[in-house]
Image: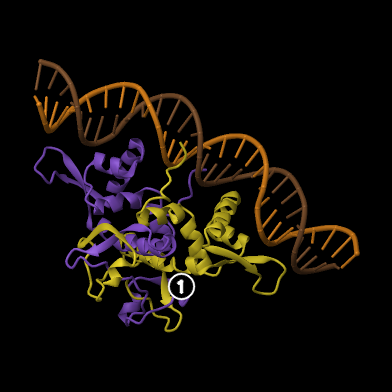
Chain colours: A purple, B yellow, C orange, D brown
Amino acid sequence: MRRTDLGGANCPIARSLDEIGDWWTLMIVRDAFRGARRFSEFQRGLGLAKNILSVRLRKMLDDGILELVPAAGGGAHREYQLTDKGLRLRVILVAIRQWGEDHLFEAGEPMMVMVGKEDGQPIGRLRLTSKDGRSIDPWDIDVKDGVRGTEDVG
Amino acid sequence: MRRTDLGGANCPIARSLDEIGDWWTLMIVRDAFRGARRFSEFQRGLGLAKNILSVRLRKMLDDGILELVPAAGGGAHREYQLTDKGLRLRVILVAIRQWGEDHLFEAGEPMMVMVGKEDGQPIGRLRLTSKDGRSIDPWDIDVKDGVRGTEDVG
DNA sequence: TAGAGATGGTTTCATCATTAAACCAAGAAT
DNA sequence: ATTCTTGGTTTAATGATGAAACCATCTCTA
């Protein structure tokens, strides 16, 4: 009777949501991208209960999304840092962000925006494309059984 | 003491997760993209409790992600259909899917793949880009206060 | 057209997850 | 040496989720 387990599905969406599909994990990742590295920074930034944060951080360490590293400033403590796997969640956050900007804000309402570090300009919109780069509409996609890599061989 | 409300934040990620950040909503959207249109189709496809599905579907109708339309086959009942707002969640699902494919599957393990309806070829990878189309790495992004549209004016 | 089954839920109750608050050990600051 | 901060854990209450039973309406078949 425990919460449904989607981790064994052969659908990558199901398996991903089983790992990062809860209320807090992606918010923690967001704050990590904003520079949060310590327990108290996450806790203050998100306003979630400490025991919940504790459980989440431990699970994210187990899952290899975060890792503990020696303090950046040379302190004796250790800090939470996104792994490469965690850094790759950025695309998901950007997709979520752009959808929210489009559908959850009124015109003129203030919002946080993402900008490229280099030019300071807002980043471009994500586009669904075919292999050769042409745009695809959301409804022009099918799902079928497969194995990654096979379609790249021939 | 109710669950934390992120709906009022000025961060689009927080606001989005408040609406679609629970365990089931994106799975329901996934099945809708696969062609599910009726209560029993969602219920069988996902294996979730009927009362939970009931609450979720109603909320998704309220949020304008789904709408009820006359049955496609001319039957007397009504069916659930993705709105445009719902269809735009596809990018998020693709981002989640590609991350899962990269980090949650072993080599050679069978998985569902997304293909373009037109050419039957797996869709291309999502890329983070600057406004002018150049690729950006996940760590080369900052977040700042802003208002949508202002940066497009000058 | 009567009966049987499928559909689309609602209700009830048990269990799991989240929350707030209190507590505590170890490290950092004074 | 003492006080404050950090990074948690524990406890108890409440909210969300799950399984199963129940029910009114639609739909199919004889």
Which amino acid, mark 1?
A: Lys
Residue A89 visible in the current orientation: no
Q: Chain of mark 1?
A: A
In the rendered image, residue A120, in percent from the top left (x then y), is placed at 20, 65
Identify the secondary structure beneath mark 1. Answer: strand
Residue nearest the observer in this picture, B114 or A120: A120
Q: Residue A86 at what x, y percent from top left?
A: 27, 56
Expressed as whole percent of the image width and height from the top left, the position of residue A66 reads 25, 50
Please tell me which residue is depicted at 38% across the width and 62% down the height of the picture: A108
Residue B71 vertical position relative to residue B145 in the rendered view, above or below: below
Residue ID at (32%, 72%): B125
Residue A59 vertical position relative to residue B76 in the rendered view, above or below: above
- Which image quadrant is residue C22 in? top left
Q: Quadrant of residue D21?
A: top right
Assign the N terminus of chain B to one quadrant of the image.
top left
Q: Which of the two residues, C27 or C4, is positioned nearer the viewer here?
A: C27
Residue at x 37%, y 53% (from the top left corner): B14
For label 1, the residue is: A144
Can you tell which quarter of the image residue D27 is in?
bottom right
Question: Around disc 1, counting alpha carbons within 10 Å, would you say few (fewer than 14), some (14 to 19), or many (20 or more)?
Answer: few
Q: Is C6 positioned to the left or the right of A64 in the image? A: right
Q: Residue B40 appears at what percent x and percent y? A: 62, 60
User: In the rendered picture of this protein, how many numbered marks are placed on residues?
Assistant: 1
Which quadrant would the C terminus of chain B be assigned to in this image?
bottom left
**Residue A8: in sight, yes or no?**
yes
